[in-house]
Amino acid sequence: MSKDERDFGADGAQDEDPARSGPEEHSSTTGSREHELSGASGVSEAGGQEPEEKADDQMSKSQSSEKKQGSFWKELPVLVVIALVLAFVIRTWLVQAFYIPSSSMENTLLIGDRVLVNKVVYQLRDIERGEVVVFDGDGSWDDPNMVSVPEPANPVSGAFTWVQQQLGAAPTGKEYIKRVIGLPGDTVECCDEQNRVLVNGVPLEEEAYLYPGSVASHTEFGPIEVPEGHLWLMGDHRSISADSRMNQNNPGGGAVPVDHVVGRAFVIIWPLSQVGSLGAPDAFEELDTESG
């Protein structure tokens, strides 16, 4: 067989050279496609797992939220009890709000004003002249101007009134509020030639805080020595205030026991137009200086 015959097959077509890379390239191409398909399959599998992971994450968040809500409702009663205990402690021993029910302290305090009373200050120091104090006048005073609180019609109404009283939004009908004029051992009297109150012989210049047009006293009194352990108290609206002057026939001769004092009214908190501190007027600083 000639060389030409060897180079062609029986059908006359030239045989493929085994050294050519045609089949290998085909195999390589096939392998490449398989690799791509394999890679595509891997991405597809990863994508198929994402919804499950998201669902698990959402379920975890939902369970966490439910636990937090459940924990809040379980803790709420405890928080309420703690708040009530703190409020009770603060009101009983530290600071309490009071409602002004009468006009006996005008214009310093008006009807409906709310004041905060410091209940611990007099545990740390003595009462000073000129300070405004809240006290229980039971057994010492009979004030016809004192506002009486009607009995509640039902338990709900009574509870509502009690809450208002604790917040200083309603009168209690038990406490009075006046200004300290004389301390234990002081001698008080009225009036001198200029119609001024005298404390230990020193006249008080009271125009800064008395009700406009009011005089120091419409009733003369004294000289009276304030008993030990007692205070001489007067309202700033002297023409209508049923204070120490008007209770001289009662126990204490009009003076109020120091241990009946609830505390010092130190600030007006309501209404906003009245907000301000309640300090001792300058007239009493001058008195303290002159009294030594």
Image: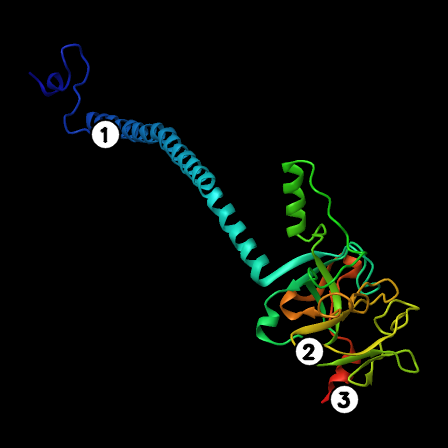
In the image, what residue type sits under mark 2? Pro
Cα separation between marks 2 and 1: 115 Å
Residue name at image x 43 percent, y 34 percent = 62
The residue tagged 1 is 28
Residue name at image x 73 percent, y 44 percent = 150
Cα separation between marks 2 and 3: 17 Å
Compared with 206, 211 (above or below) is above
State left or right for residue 260 relative to residue 288. left
The residue tagged 2 is 184
SS type, badge 1: helix
The one of 38 and 273 positioned closer to us in this rendering: 273
Residue name at image x 12 percent, y 16 percent = 5
Q: Position of residue 130 (x, y in %)?
A: 75, 74
Quarter of the image with the N terminus is top left
The one of 43 and 9 positioned closer to us in this rendering: 43
SS type, badge 3: helix
In the image, what residue type sits under mark 1? Ser
State left or right for residue 57 relative to residue 252. left
Quarter of the image with the C terminus is bottom right
Q: Position of residue 2 (x, y in %)?
A: 8, 18
Q: Position of residue 187 (x, y in %)?
A: 76, 81
Q: Position of residue 24 (x, y in %)?
A: 20, 28
The residue tagged 3 is 290
Residue furthest to the top in view is 11
